[in-house]
Image: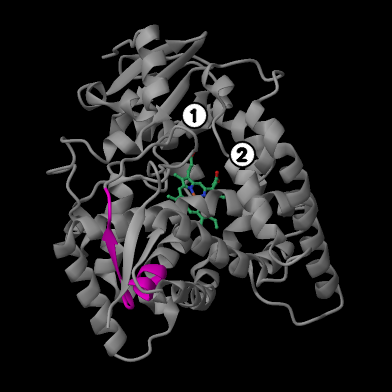
């Protein structure tokens, strides 16, 4: 069945909060069709249709034009925005970078960065924006795992440029929502252009610096940069693609993990009976003696469950956008060439058909004895199919290690309620941040 949404209604919703576009009708209809300025969009709330688009007939779909317009100027031929042969070659070349052995190798940096970061919470009576803090923490972890801190330029300059860049260029421009032609300059891009040029130069210099060290036979750290440089060559990545992928890892892995961490701390504070369970697990684990950080993810299943449940309620990527390359059909739905399909983790994750008490924060859904009951297409925080998130195991490990490091020492309490508001950015943002009171747990 298809349900059209009127044009005036659509303008009203987009201006108020696009999440409403996925309001009540999304829970009654398997898909909703929207026509807007000559663009045909299908909002897919049905696991079968999502599976069809992301997996079974994935070869007929590419990344949607609207997302490419926003992201490609920044990420160029990085994995997230690459298409066709470039994507295929890059994904194959990068698979060895994300093996469990390498991901485990990053665990120590994740634990040390989280521990060092937590020092700021020693201030008595501290009320802080935890959403912003998690952005800073995941940046620290990425800077360490990407470059081991060996970054070209003035100290602190890189972090500042990342902030500037994603404050401006990561935003959805109103012209993109309206489907304005590509050649019309976007206000958001004009503001971010200087930042982007500066940022690219630092990345290129950092890569070149490491390459020189490798050529000299220096002992270099086994971080993402070294691993990516080892893929350089005819069947692997070009130098420009390595630079694009470094920027992509920052773009795809920084805000997303930060949002998931922030929402987990917020939801645990709103459900102190669940927080007790997680704190008890972490306290017992810390008392049991030192455990190498790469084992933390497996040894803290209840903490992991809270993180996964938070990504169910607030998936950092609320929709996955595709565009049909050729005409296609799913049951009685005609998907015409050029149509956009939005696969919706947001609605699937909150659907009464698939989850009991869907709006409640219940981490037990993801406890080891229950996870087998969750269907693959019912829970999609990392997407599915050939373009599934390549950094998923990195992000899960990072999330659990950071939560253990923070919650073993501090208690997080909410000071006000919030709601998600992804209007301006691509990830599910809390409106007005996540102000929380942080107290040492002695
Ligand atoms: C792709 C989510 C962390 C790198 C994706 C996709 C999702 C996603 C949903 C698929 C997009 C689509 O199909 O349109 C997340 C979430 C994260 C996270 C929720 C954290 C909680 C990371 C990290 C990295 C990363 C830490 C890198 C270090 C990528 C890349 C792609 C991707 C490169 C593109 C893959 C491809 O197209 O082949 N991510 N991600 N992500 N992610 Fe993640």
- Residue 291's place in the image compared with 214, above or below, is below
Q: Return the residue at label 2.
A: 168
Q: Return the residue at label 1.
A: 322
* Residue 404 forms part of the magenta stretch: yes
Q: Position of residue 233 (x, y in %)?
A: 78, 57
Residue 403 in sight in this render: yes
Crowdedness near tag 1: few (<14), some (14–19) or many (≥20) residues, C-alpha within 10 Å: many
The residue under the point 50% across, 43% down is 387
The N terminus lies in quadrant: top left
The C terminus lies in quadrant: bottom left
**Between discs 1 and 2, the one toward the N terminus:** 2
Mark 1: is the Cβ under 8 angstroms from ligand 1? yes
Q: Position of residue 159 (x, y in %)?
A: 64, 59
- The residue at the far bottom in this view is 289
Q: Position of residue 73 (x, y in %)?
A: 69, 36
Q: Are marks 1 and 2 in contact (CB under 8 Å)?
A: no
Q: Is residue 368 left or right of residue 262?
A: left
C-alpha distance separating marks 1 and 2: 24 Å
The residue under the point 51% across, 28% down is 61
Q: Position of residue 409 (x, y in %)?
A: 33, 78
Give the magenta-colored segment's residue range: 401-416
């Amino acid at each position: 069945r298809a349900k059209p949404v009127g044009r005036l209604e659509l303008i009203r919703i987009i201006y108020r909060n696009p999440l409403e576009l996925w309001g009540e009708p999304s829970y009654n209809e398997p898909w909703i069709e929207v026509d807007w300025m000559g663009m045909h969009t299908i909002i897919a709330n049905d696991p079968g249709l999502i599976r069809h688009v992301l997996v079974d007939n994935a070869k007929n779909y590419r990344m949607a034009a609207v997302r490419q317009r926003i992201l490609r100027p920044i990420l160029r031929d990085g994995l997230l925005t690459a298409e066709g042969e470039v994507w295929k070659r890059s994904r194959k070349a990068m698979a060895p970078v994300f093996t469990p052995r390498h991901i485990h190798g990053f665990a120590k940096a994740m634990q040390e960065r989280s521990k060092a970061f937590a020092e700021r919470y020693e201030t008595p009576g501290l009320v802080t924006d935890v959403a912003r803090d998690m952005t800073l923490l995941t940046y620290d972890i990425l800077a360490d795992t990407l470059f081991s801190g060996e970054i070209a330029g003035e100290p602190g300059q890189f972090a500042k440029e990342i902030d500037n860049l994603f404050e401006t260029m990561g935003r959805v421009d109103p012209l993109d929502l309206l489907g304005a032609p590509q050649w019309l300059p976007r206000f958001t891009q004009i503001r971010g252009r200087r930042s982007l040029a500066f940022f690219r130069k630092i990345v290129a210099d950092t890569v070149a610096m490491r390459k020189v060290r490798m050529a000299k036979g220096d002992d270099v750290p086994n971080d993402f940069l070294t691993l990516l440089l080892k893929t350089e060559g005819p069947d692997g990545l070009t130098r420009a693609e390595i630079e694009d992928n470094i920027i992509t890892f920052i773009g795809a892995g920084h805000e997303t993990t930060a949002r998931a961490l922030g929402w987990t701390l917020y939801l645990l504070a709103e459900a102190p009976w669940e927080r007790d369970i997680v704190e008890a697990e972490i306290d017992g684990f810390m008392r049991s003696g030192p455990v190498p950080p790469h084992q933390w993810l497996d040894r803290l299943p209840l903490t992991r469950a809270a993180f996964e449940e938070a990504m169910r309620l607030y998936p950092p990527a609320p929709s996955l956008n595709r565009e049909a390359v050729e005409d296609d059909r799913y049951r009685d739905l005609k998907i015409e060439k050029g149509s956009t399909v939005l696969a919706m983790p947001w609605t699937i994750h909150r659907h009464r058909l698939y989850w009991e008490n869907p709006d409640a924060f219940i981490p037990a859904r993801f406890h080891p004895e229950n996870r087998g009951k969750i269907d693959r297409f019912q829970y999609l925080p990392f997407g599915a199919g050939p373009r599934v998130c390549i950094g998923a195991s990195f992000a899960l490990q990072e999330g659990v290690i950071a939560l253990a490091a923070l919650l073993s020492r501090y208690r997080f309490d909410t000071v006000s309620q919030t709601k998600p508001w992804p209007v301006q950015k691509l990830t599910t943002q809390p409106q007005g941040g996540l102000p929380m009171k942080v107290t040492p747990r002695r």
